[in-house]
Image (cartoon, grey):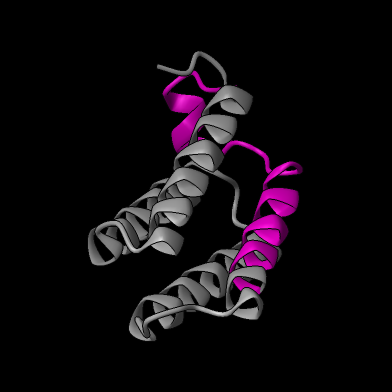
Amino acid sequence: MPQTFAEMVVETVDFVERALARIEQGDGADTELHNVRAYLVNTLELIERDPGIEAAADDLYATAAAFVADQGPEHGRRDKRVLQEAFLRLREKLAGAAPSEKARGMRLE
């Protein structure tokens, strides 16, 4: 379990990245999409409100949902690239996140 806010953010980013990799491979994509949503919601509760982070999280989820909905025989490289770009935008935004009051109450600072 993470001891600091920064460790919590890194851990969440790792969970999201692994879930996206499984989505790209088609391994339980619907379940992994649900996991991505849960990770994002939990993370947004623990960071100070930031419209840029919220937009990046919404974009990542929408991109992942579209990827899962288009479960054709072979996703193109472009589809995977778009998904990875959305993930990278969120990861970059989270790097500057500040802990919310809830996180501070949990002593994640």
Relative vertical location of residue 22 with respect to residue 99 in this rendering, above or below: below
Q: Which residues are magenta?
A: 82-109
Relative vertical location of residue 48 with respect to residue 20 in this rendering, above or below: above
Q: Nearer the viewer, residue 34 or 78?
A: 78
Q: At 59% from the left edge and 36% from the top edge, which residue is drawn? A: 99
Image quarter for residue 67?
A: bottom left
Furthest toward the front, the residue is 73
Q: Nearer the viewer, residue 5 or 91?
A: 91
Where residue 76 appears, as percent x and y from the top left, is 57, 80
Instruction: Locate residue 77 relative to residue 35 in the image: left or right.
Output: right
Where residue 14 appears, as percent x and y from the top left, is 52, 37
* Quarter placement of the C terminus: top right
Instruction: Locate residue 18 relative to residue 38 in the image: left or right.
Output: right
Q: At 51% from the left edge and 30% from the top edge, which residue is drawn? A: 11
Where residue 9 appears, as percent x and y from the top left, is 57, 35
Q: At 41% from the left edge and 59% from the top edge, which residue is drawn? A: 25
103 falls in the magenta region: yes
Q: At 48% from the left edge and 32% from the top edge, which residue is drawn? A: 103
Number of numbered discs visible in the structure rendering: 0
Q: Nearer the viewer, residue 1 or 27?
A: 27
74 falls in the magenta region: no
Magenta span: chief secondary structure: helix
Where residue 24 appears, as percent x and y from the top left, is 45, 62
* Quarter placement of the N terminus: top left
Relative vertical location of residue 6 with respect to residue 22 in this rendering, above or below: above
Relative vertical location of residue 65 with respect to residue 23 in this rendering, above or below: below
